[in-house]
Image (cartoon, rainbow, N blue to C red):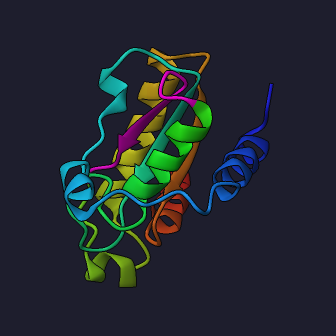
Amino acid sequence: MLSLLTLSTLLLSITSAFPTEPFPSALQIRQSSTENGLSAACKAVTLIYARGTNEDGNVGTVAGPPWFTRLRAALGTSLINVQGVTYSATVAGYLAGGDAAGSTEMLRLINLASTQCPSTKIVLGGYRYVSCLENLSEIY
């Protein structure tokens, strides 16, 4: 079994290998600012993603959707589910060191993924704010 760090490194190296692929259009990004992969059938990898500060949906529009497009192109859509974390993602929460409700939600999604899909590899990702949520998730 791959460790979380090994899997994260593998995913990062796979997606870095495709720097010339075009990013989705602004319209495609706006249409994909929400991902609820845990409501779908289990897949080999479940990416739980926290959007950046003040972004729309539960995965945002800046970094998440283009990254998901590359991951799906590299791994295949049949291998990866993406689940966004719904939380306030405000500047105040960021400056306070994280959003407690968001951390609780991230932990809930991690537990849900591991119970619903026991053989899935869970990868945590996000844009800026995610380290605050991940650190607080360890506390809750």
Which sits in the foreground, 27 or 85? 27
The reply to whether residue 70 is in sight is yes
Q: Residue visible at 72% across and 41% down?
A: 7
Q: Magenta stretch: residue 115 in it? A: no
Locate residue 139, reporting x and y percent. 52, 55
Q: Is residue 57 visible?
A: no
Q: How many marks?
A: 0
The image shows residue 1, relative to residue 135, as above or below, that is above
Compared with 128, 74 (above or below) is above
Magenta span: 76-86
The x, y position of residue 67, in whole percent, is 49, 54
Closer to the camera in the image, 126 or 137: 126
Residue 35, image quadrant: top left
The quadrant of the picture occupied by the N terminus is top right
**Residue at 27 percent of width and 57 percent of height:** 29
Residue under the image location 27 percent in, 52 percent down:
58
The reply, left or right, for residue 115 in relation to residue 93 is right
Residue 42 image position (x, y, % from top left): 46, 17
Corner quadrant of residue 40: top left
Position above or below: 15 against 38? below
Q: Position of residue 122 (x, y in %)?
A: 58, 35
